[in-house]
């Protein structure tokens, strides 16, 4: 849900009427890396795209880009942090 909010995509990041049906399911395995390295199921716009880690259907989509304002004053704070480490 957080990435959808950051991108301002009100129709994503939730399971509700009118929301885009983009959902991914993972098996809970021994490690975080193995859990998220292979999707059990992935739905895009309500259509199955991945089953057991294999792409079974190609579905078109869009690329969303965010270009937030950048506060360059943070660089001095970051530099001090790394100088102290």
Image (cartoon, helix red, strand yellow):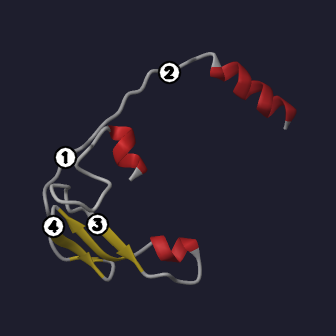
Dots 2, 3 in contact, CB < 8 A: no
Q: Which residue is mark 2?
A: 70
Q: Secondary structure at mark 2?
A: loop
Q: Is 38 on the left-hand or right-hand side of 71?
A: left
**Pointer 4 local density, CA inside 10 Å: few below 14, some 14–19, many at least 20:** few
Q: Earlier in the sequence, mark 2 or mark 4?
A: 4
Up/down of 39 relative to 6, above or below:
below
Q: Residue at x 44, y 21 (%)?
A: 69
Q: Which residue is mark 4?
A: 46
The answer to which image quadrant residue 85 occupies is: top right
Instruction: Say which of marks 2 and 3 sits in front.
Output: 3
Instruction: Say which of marks 2 and 4 sits in front.
Output: 4
Q: Which mark is residue 44?
A: none
Q: Earlier in the sequence, mark 3 or mark 1?
A: 3
Q: Which residue is mark 1?
A: 62
Q: Earlier in the sequence, mark 4 or mark 1?
A: 4
Q: Which residue is mark 3?
A: 23
> CA separation, marks 2 and 1?
25 Å
Residue 82 position within the rendered picture, expressed as x and y whole percent measured from the top left: 78, 33
Dots 3, 1 in contact, CB < 8 A: no
Q: Earlier in the sequence, mark 3 or mark 4?
A: 3
Q: Residue at x 71, y 19 (%)?
A: 76
Q: Earlier in the sequence, mark 2 or mark 1?
A: 1
Q: Earlier in the sequence, mark 2 or mark 3?
A: 3
Q: Is 73 on the left-hand or right-hand side of 25?
A: right
> CA separation, marks 4 and 1?
15 Å
> CA separation, marks 2 and 4?
36 Å
Dots 2, 4 in contact, CB < 8 A: no
Residue 70 position within the rendered picture, expressed as x and y whole percent measured from the top left: 50, 21
Of residues 47 and 50, the one drawn nearer to the viewer in this rendering: 47
């Amino acid at each position: 849900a957080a990435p959808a909010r950051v991108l301002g995509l009100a129709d994503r990041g939730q399971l509700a009427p009118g929301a885009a049906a983009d959902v991914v399911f993972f098996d809970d395995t021994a490690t975080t890396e193995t859990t998220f390295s292979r999707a059990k199921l992935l739905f895009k716009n309500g259509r199955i795209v991945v089953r057991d880690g294999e792409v079974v259907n190609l579905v078109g989509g869009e690329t969303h880009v965010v270009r937030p304002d950048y506060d360059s004053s943070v660089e001095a704070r970051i530099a001090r942090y790394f100088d102290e480490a």
